[in-house]
Image (tube, rainbow, N blue to C red):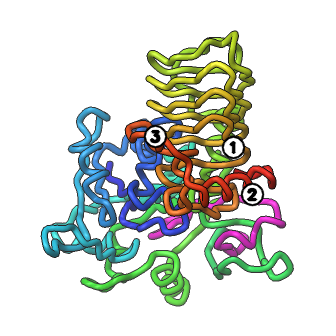
Amino acid sequence: MKAMILAAGKGTRVRPITYTTPKPMIPILQKPVMEFLVELLRQHGFNQIMVNVSHLANEIENYFRDGQRFGVEIGYSFEGRIVDGELVGEALGSAGGMKRIQDFNPFFDDTFVVLCGDALIDLDLTEAVRWHKEKGSIATIVMKSVPREEVSSYGVIVTDETGRVKQFQEKPSVEEAMSTDINTGIYIFEPEVLNYIPSGKEYDIGGELFPQLVEMGAPFYGIAMDFQWVDIGKVPDYWRAIRGVLTGEIQNVSIPGKEVIPGVYTGLNVSVNLDKVDIKGPVYIGAMTQIEDGAKIIGPSMIGPSCRICSGATVENSVIFEYSRLGPGVRLVDKLVFGRYCVDKTGASIDVQAAALDWLITDTRQAIPVNTPEEGRAIAELLESEGRP
């Protein structure tokens, strides 16, 4: 059975992570989100998977290769070109990406599934496909019902009593929303649907193809299903995903490593004296990370591999990516540290290098400045006085 994973987007709402990491490769406790999707597809018999790539395409292709080690076959459709030796992405949109694959050689020759590459799901795909075929649908959206107060964050779908899609509302207000069923970016198609997508141009599934199908009166349905769906569309969503895994709310992702004390998991060769560190789970600490005596770690928190948390530093309800060094006395509460960026849980970020704070938060592979710049010291004192370094 055949499927497609949409992986060509730039992920602008998840910056700064997506400056160097494509959205499908964003790790959920060291495992890329797209790997969970590949596993789900394999479990339901979808063993031939096409992936459209563009932004940071090499990162995805070099990790998944031909899919052999994941028990599937994977092929890639690159959208872009090389300019001055560099790959330049030119994404064709979700529908345009499907059409490009089909124009190259008719790959989609039977019912197929399309998934967005940036969500954690545990959907019963087999049941969704069965329902799709029973309806005689050429396109089916898998929907999820959300509390009415959340509808303004999503694309809302209005269906009739048979499940036929009648109307779309893009992020309506709570008062204007005509439904609480939202688009999850999970689609089931018949090859016929590709006839309605123009070749060689950018074209979107939700914004262009679906309204066209409604206007045509095509057999186009939506099915609301009860399943776990964690969309990583923005930095706050990623924050909630990590927190959900650590607290056990997201049950289809296990915490890796070894549980050294209740609620505290570590990877290989972590250097920490649990008797001299104030630590309260749930916490995950990656391999080859050093937690110095006198540090404080309060969960839910994730500290990636090859990090160093210095004596007197505090990490509380935070996510620290690999190779991060937190200097003595740094207090991170509700923060995400990614490379040279410190991000709060609303998505607002500080470039610690540009702010002369790299003596407080830096890369473990860099030399630590001997003298603290006066300007940086003043900024640090101001941040500490606000309790939000």
Disc on the earlier residue, 2 or 1:
1
- Report the Cα–Cα distance between label 2 and label 1: 14 Å
Q: Quadrant of residue 192?
A: bottom left
Q: Which amino acid type is marked by label 1? A: Leu
Q: Find residue 235 and report its horizontal and vertical position in percent.
A: 60, 58
Q: Which amino acid type is marked by label 2? A: Leu
Disc on the earlier residue, 2 or 3:
3
Q: Residue at x 32, y 80 (%)?
A: 195
Residue 40 visible in the snapshot:
no
Label 2 belongs to which residue? Answer: 382
- Report the Cα–Cα distance between label 1 and label 3: 19 Å
Label 3 belongs to which residue? Answer: 368
In the displayed structure, would residue 368 be above or below residue 210?
Answer: above
Residues in magenta, as a range: 135-162
Label 1 belongs to which residue? Answer: 332
Q: Dot 2: within a 10 Å radius of its alpha carbon, few (fewer than 14), some, or many (20 or more) residues?
A: few
Under circle 2, the secondary element is helix
In the displayed structure, would residue 7 be above or below residue 306?
Answer: below
